Structures are given as C-alpha cells and as structure tokens.
Amino acid sequence: MYNNIINLIEKATGLRVKLFHTKEIEPCIVYDVSPVSNNGISAIDNLQIRIIHNSARECIEAEEKINKILLTCGDRIGGEFTSARVNGGGFMPQDETNTVHKYTFYLIRRKAV
C-alpha cells in the first residue's frame, strides 16, 4: 500500500528508504507504519520517518522534499490516500556515529481497505 510513496521518497531525496531499522552508518531514511484507526470507510495510519544524514541542514532538505510528496498526497499520489499532516517529530544527534537523526511523524488518512 505504501510502495508508491516509498518509491517517490527515494526518487525525490536520492536516499535509500528502509523499513524499521538500519545497521549501516550512511545517509538514508528509515520508516515504520502503524494503524491508528479504521471505521470501515476511512483509516488513519501513523507514518514515522527518520532521516539519517551528516548534518541537520541535510536532514531538513530531505524533509522538505518528503513534505512536498506527503502533504499533497491526495493530489500527487492518488489511489486510496486522501490527506496527510505532520503530527510531531524532532532531532536526535548521534555522537557515536557522527550523524543527525530527524524524526517526523505523519498522520495519513486513506480509504479503508
């Protein structure tokens, strides 16, 4: 269901997108999707995006590209996705790996399947 979104994010950012976690120390994006609600007509999912990069600036640049995709998902992606909004996030510098992790949480509304 989220394959189209992931492909668009990889293409827009030039970063590999991985599900759940990574053991590699490299710029990439890690994501996870969890259901929030589903009333049989519409559903809401929590999409957690973690951008891992060398600096906060590079994280912000990647996030801006992701926002262009997700925050217009009804128009851009189509299909079962109807809307998205940011629902939190923040930065977490990682001194051990000399990287910055930027978390953003999105609430994605879609047609129930």
Image: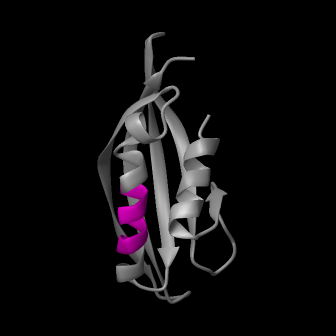
Count of numbered marks = 0
Q: Position of residue 40 (x, y in %)?
A: 48, 10
Which residue is drawn at the image coordinates 63% and 54% (left, top)?
A: 20
Quarter of the image where the C terminus is located:
top right
Q: Nearer the viewer, residue 57 or 48?
A: 57
Res. 30 image quadrant: bottom right
Furthest residue to the front? 75
The vertical placement of 43 against 51, above or below, is: above
Drawn side of residue 42 relative to residue 17, left or right: left
Which residue is drawn at the image coordinates 43% and 69% (left, top)?
A: 62
Quarter of the image where the N terminus is located:
top right
Q: Position of residue 34 (x, y in %)?
A: 52, 37
Which residue is drawn at the image coordinates 43% and 12% (left, top)?
A: 39
Q: Position of residue 99 (x, y in %)?
A: 49, 84
The vertical placement of 22 against 89, above or below, is: below
The vertical placement of 103 against 24, above or below, is: above
Residue 100 colored in magenta in the image = no
Q: Position of residue 63 (x, y in %)?
A: 39, 64
Drawn side of residue 52 relative to residue 104, left or right: right
The residue range painted magenta reads 60-67
